[in-house]
Amino acid sequence: MHPAQRFRKLIRKFTYIFPFFIYSISWEQCKLGLLLQTLPFKQFLKEPEVDGKYEIIQQGNEPVIGLANGTPCGDYKDVVIFGDHTLSLYKPQRPFFVATDGVRIVKGQQYTDGYYLLSLLEKYKPQSEGYKRYFSILADANCITTYNVSEQKQIGFFFWYMDHLITLHQRKPF
C-alpha cells in the first residue's frame, strides 16, 4: 500500500476513535485570563464536622480533608478548584466547601465544560517557582481554545475517560 493511502486510512481510523478531530470549528488564541472568572469563596469556607454531608476541598495532593454541613457551592459541574500556592487542580463531583483562602474556584466567562476547563488549566499551568500566588501568572498565559460547546464536551470527556482508565489500571487487585 502506498504511504499516502496508509496515512489516509490512519486518519480515518483516528477520527473514528477521536471524533472531535473532525470538527472544522476554528480555534482561537487569547490570554487565559480572558476566558476565566473566579467565584467568591469566603461564603464557602468551612472546618470539618463530625456528621458532615459535603466535601471540604483544600489545595495539595489530598484535596478532600473532611465533610461539613450548611449551604455548599452548588455550581460544581463547570468549575475547577485551583490551588493558588501549590498549583493543584481538582474537579469537584458534587456540591462542596473550601478549607482555605489559598484556593480559587475557577469557571469560564462563557459556558465552558468543566472537564474541558480542567484539561485547559492543566495544559497551561505554570511551572512551580516556590511559594507564591500563581493565578495571575496562569491568567497571563497565552492559550489556544475553542468556544464550541459540543467540541469542549467531547474533549473534556476524552480526557476524563483517559484519566478514569489510568486510575482503574493503577488500582491494585484485592
Image: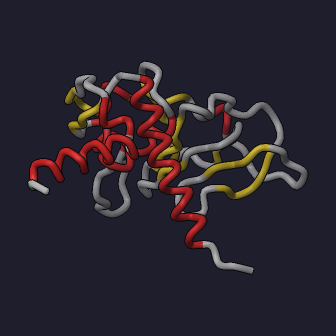
Q: Position of residue 42 (x, y in %)?
A: 62, 34
Q: Is residue 113 left or right of residue 9?
A: right
Report the residue at 63% width, 28% height from top: 75
Q: Residue furthest top?
A: 110
Relative height, residue 60 to residue 126 (above, below): below
Q: Residue furthest right?
A: 51
Relative height, residue 139 to residue 58 (above, below): above
Quadrant of the drawing holding the N terminus: bottom left
Q: Position of residue 7 (x, y in %)?
A: 17, 50
Q: Quadrant of residue 20?
A: top left
Q: Is residue 36 visible?
A: yes
Q: Position of residue 138 (x, y in %)?
A: 31, 42
Q: Is residue 7 left or right of residue 41?
A: left
Quadrant of the drawing holding the C terminus: bottom right
Report the residue at 41% width, 39% height from top: 155
Which sits in the foreground, 15 or 69? 15
Q: Is residue 105 visible?
A: no
Tell me, what colour scheme is on the image?
secondary structure
Relative height, residue 70 to residue 103 (above, below): above
Which sits in the foreground, 141 or 6? 6
Report the residue at 33% width, 41% height from top: 15
Q: Position of residue 113 (x, y in %)?
A: 48, 31
Q: Is residue 27 left or right of residue 91?
A: left
Report the residue at 66% width, 56% height from top: 64
